[in-house]
Amino acid sequence: MGKLESLMKAHGANISDSFGTSAGHAAPALPPGMSLADAQRAPSRDQGVTRSKNAVEIPTDRIVRDPDQPREEFDEEAIDRLAESMKTKGQLQPIRVRWSEGQGAYVVVMGERRWRAAARAGLATLSCIVHQGQVEPAELLALQVIENCLREDLKPIEQARAYRKLQELYGWSGNRLAKELSIPQPAIVQALKLLDLPESIQAKVEAGELAPRTAYEISKLEDEADRVVLAERAAAERLTGGQVADVVKARKAGKDLATPGSCRAEFKLAAGCKVVVSGLPDQHPDTVIARLREAIKQAQRLAREGAGGQAA
């Protein structure tokens, strides 16, 4: 007879008595009007609710970032604000991590911004959902790209590089990538086109000097020198994607990039003075006036600098 069976035989009666289920004890009566089925049913607050087995508290210093995370830059001011919030309100949402035997630490799968803020806030532990099992590099990258895209955390070039890496890992076409990530195919096409541009133009996109749509239109020019010239002009004159598209069409028709078509305005002033505004994306009066105002501001600044130099 096993140890457990011996204990049950020796103390079974006492156990039954303690629960009120022995022959000498009647089962507790149900409240009036309550059926046995009602008594056995879980409380309404627990119905349909399951507990996660993966949620754990992990020391913050045992968590490290994923070096292959597609997001490379973080808004430090935003992390400071999040850190202050976590100090006062605590962690509102768990992060997702995986265990790495090679690193001897938990690696962030999703939620690096929250992890950084927690460390900055001085939180000793973080609530984490542990990703069980082996995670393939392509699967991990897909998870991170999806999360960052949904949160709009990736910069345009970072996003494009992540798309390209997923294509290489899985051998996906642009169409398949769009379906897998549930992202419109035109958005994938435009993003990938950014990687075909010279690094100087990519840098302008990353710095916010050029909108991704504008850079995409520039990519339609075949000559790299033309692309650089148009990017400089688009950034300096703050041209929209539509305006750049018109310039690209004009260039393909053989017209000059600086003055496509007849986009210039000429004004004859008193005493034979003449003012010419060239390189305009269009001849709409508002566009011409805006450029003239810019010229006046520059002239006023030069006048002030000149006066300052004379005073010195």
Image (cartoon, helix red, strand yellow):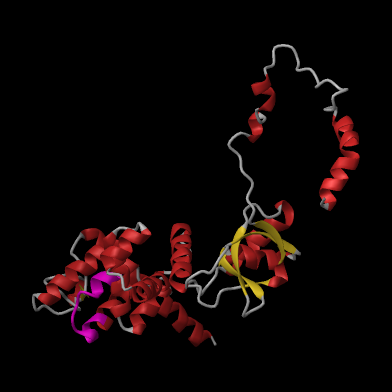
The single residue placed furthest to the front in the displayed view is: 1
Q: Quadrant of residue 286?
A: bottom left
Q: Is residue 269 magenta?
A: no
In-front residue for pair 120/13: 13
Q: Is residue 182 left or right of residue 74?
A: left
The single residue placed furthest to the top in the displayed view is: 32
Above or below residue 187? Residue 93 is above
Quick check: can you spot residue 169? yes
Q: Residue at x 11, y 76 (%)?
A: 252
Above or below residue 149? Residue 39 is above
In-front residue for pair 179/72: 179
Q: Is residue 233 left or right of residue 124?
A: left
Above or below residue 182? Residue 308 is below
Q: Residue at x 41, y 72 (%)?
A: 162
**Position of residue 138 measured from the top left corner of the image (x, y, whole percent):** 43, 71
In-front residue for pair 269/35: 35
Q: How many marks?
A: 0
Q: Residue at x 45, y 67 (%)?
A: 139
Give the prevailing secondary structure in the magenta stretch: helix
Q: Is residue 43 left or right of residue 284?
A: right
Q: Quadrant of residue 38?
A: top right
In-front residue for pair 292/34: 34
**Position of residue 221 measured from the top left corner of the image (x, y, whole percent):** 19, 77
- The magenta stretch is 214-227
Quick check: can you spot residue 290? no
Above or below residue 123? Residue 300 is below
**Position of residue 73 measured from the top left corner of the image (x, y, whole percent):** 52, 73
Q: Quadrant of the C terminus?
A: bottom right
**Position of residue 112 measured from the top left corner of the image (x, y, whole percent):** 58, 67
Q: Is residue 219 magenta?
A: yes
